[in-house]
Amino acid sequence: MPQNKYLQVIEHPLVHLYITKLRDQHSGVQAFREAMDRLGGILGYHALSHVSTKDVQVQTPLERTSGVELAKTVHVVPILRAGLSLVQGILHFVPNAKVGHIGVYRDHQSHEPINYYDNLPEGLDKGTCIVVDPMLATGGSASHAISYLKENGANDIVFTCVIAAPEGVERVHNTHPDVPIITTYLDRELNEQAYILPGLGDAGDRYFGTTPS
Ligand code: PRP
Ligand code: URA
């Protein structure tokens, strides 16, 4: 799958290191969380290259010079639950970002997204929305979340994930061609249960230490 300005796969040795920890079925909750948190920082850094800045003047102890500040509010929108694992990656760099929540789980049979909770900040139309979720599998959850944000006024949206499947990238590109996808890894394909291969299993269960339902 060719990269373009709407699909960025971050290439870095640390990404390979942390993804290997996530993939390893022997990684316990602590090792899994640490690796995910670090990838959240790497994703956050790259996602924030999409925010716009405006010129400002700043007074150093010696003279006045030019600088920049954020031109728009940053909104981080985790897709619950697993998306919560990537929120700090953005807040680390933009501690005053607003956080909106969209609760979606996949139906076990149809694999289609079921919406169960939303709480979005005001002023989405004036900010940049960074949607975070570690896994982009069929793309149903991401497409649903992005549509919901657009219905609520968002017009500048970036989607970030740790592992993307080609099927999910295609679905998000088809439904939301204006939304760039930033990922640390592009995996091979989905299996019959719509799990990503080689993948890492269920991101939410492994991050939160819960048992698959
Ligand atoms: C996972 C993941 C995504 C979704 C991806 O969530 O965090 O939200 O699956 O799959 P899709 O691209 O096919 O929609 P899950 O439904 O397991 O819920 P959870 O985060 O509560 O564990
Ligand atoms: N959700 C996950 O957590 N993992 C997958 O492989 C697919 C969807």
Image (spheres, rainbow, N blue to C red):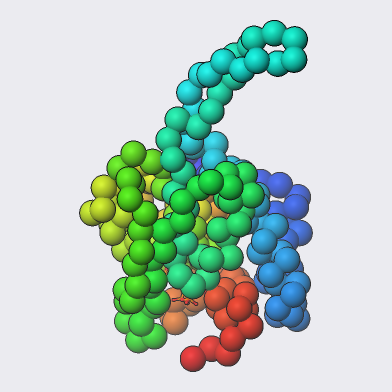
Residue drawn at 32 percent across, 81 percent down: 110
Residue drawn at 33 percent across, 47 percent down: 124
Left or right: residue 170 compared with residue 152: right
Reply above or below: 210 against 3: below
Q: Quadrant of ligand 1?
A: bottom left
Left or right: residue 11 compared with residue 2: right
Q: In this view of the protein, which residue sits in the foreground, 129 or 211?
A: 129
Q: Which image quadrant is residue 94 in? A: top right
- Is there any visible trace of residue 30 in the rendered image? yes
Left or right: residue 165 compared with residue 104: right
- Is there any visible trace of residue 112 in the rendered image? no
Residue 169 in the image, given as x and y percentages of width and height: 42, 56
In the image as oriented, which residue stretches furthest toward the top? 63
Q: In this view of the protein, which residue sits in the foreground, 3 or 94?
A: 94
Residue drawn at 26 percent across, 53 percent down: 152
Residue 75 in the image, given as x and y percentages of width and height: 44, 49
Q: How many marks?
A: 0
Q: Which image quadrant is residue 172 in? A: bottom left
Residue drawn at 34 percent across, 67 percent down: 118
Residue 11 in the image, given as x and y percentages of width and height: 66, 46
